[in-house]
Amino acid sequence: MTGTEVTAIIPVFNDRKSLEIAIPASIKSLSEITLSFEILIAEDGSSDGSAELVTEYKRQDPRIHLLHSDERQGRGRALNRAIRDARGSIICYYDVDLATGIHHLPELIDAIRHGYDISTGSRLMPDSDIVRSGGREVASRSYNFLVRSLLGSRVFDHQCGFKAFNRERILPILPAVRDNHWFWDTEILVRAQKKGYSVREFPVQWRAGKGTTVRPRDVFEMGSAVMRLWWQIHVSKD
């Protein structure tokens, strides 16, 4: 096998403790999927020693790479940069707390191998196995209903941090994606579907991380982001 088949991106901001679990778990899982992979840690201005930890791991395993930023870029910008730097023909990313069970990684990657442009885990399909508070569940379902209704998406769960892409297909979409933070996940799915890209969505096991709550301000920001993208697509034709 020539070249790199899979690049796994892990976005990180002050997540050293989670990285201590995520890196070895990723190596084990990816080794069972492909002989050719790299792990790219998109470290976004951390101050807790996350970058130093990745550097230590890289000394032991050259398949691990650190993509460091001195200043906080935001999740979306960090992912854009990492995808452009990735060498794999298949690119996946997942949250460092492994909220989505990493045992789903083979299914995520196989969908791209079998011809899909994008694959994504879903916490909102009938067979999904999730544990989170009632408030977050209501907010998530309401948000995703809004995205489907106003933006014409066929995906049920846009914000699950467990996605994979065909690199050649996703690179042309990146310049159009404007959001630099949490809405990036939704925007890339919506814009890709508008271009006719194929998306494979499948149910996952998911557990909410500690300290995650929904505030009234979050609900307002969700609605505002959806309306902003609707305007960009339907009025300004971006």
Image (cartoon, rainbow, N blue to C red):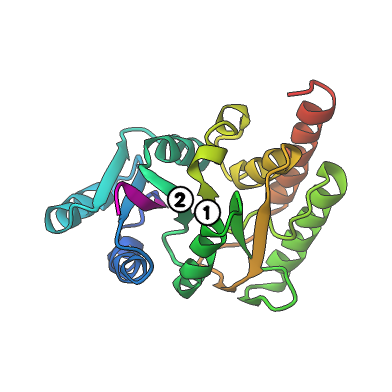
Residue type for callout 1: Ala
Residue at mark 2:
90
Q: Magenta residues, as a range?
A: 1-10
Q: Residue at x 78, y 44 (%)?
A: 223
Q: Position of residue 116 (x, y in %)?
A: 61, 54
Q: Is residue 132 above or below residue 84?
A: below
**Left or right of residue 197: residue 118:** left
Residue type for callout 2: Ile
Q: Is residue 1 above or below residue 98?
A: above
From the image, give the main secondary structure of the stretch colored magenta: strand
Q: Is residue 79 visible?
A: yes
The answer to which quarter of the image holds residue 193 is top right
Q: How many marks?
A: 2
Q: Is residue 174 above or below residue 56?
A: above
Q: Residue at x 80, y 34 (%)?
A: 230
State which tag comes first along the sequence, 2 or 1. 2
Residue most toward the front?
1
Give yes or no for contact between labels 2 and 1 (Cβ–Cβ under 8 Å). Answer: yes
Residue at mark 1:
164
Label 2 CA crowd tier, 10 Å (few <14, some 14–19, many 20+): many
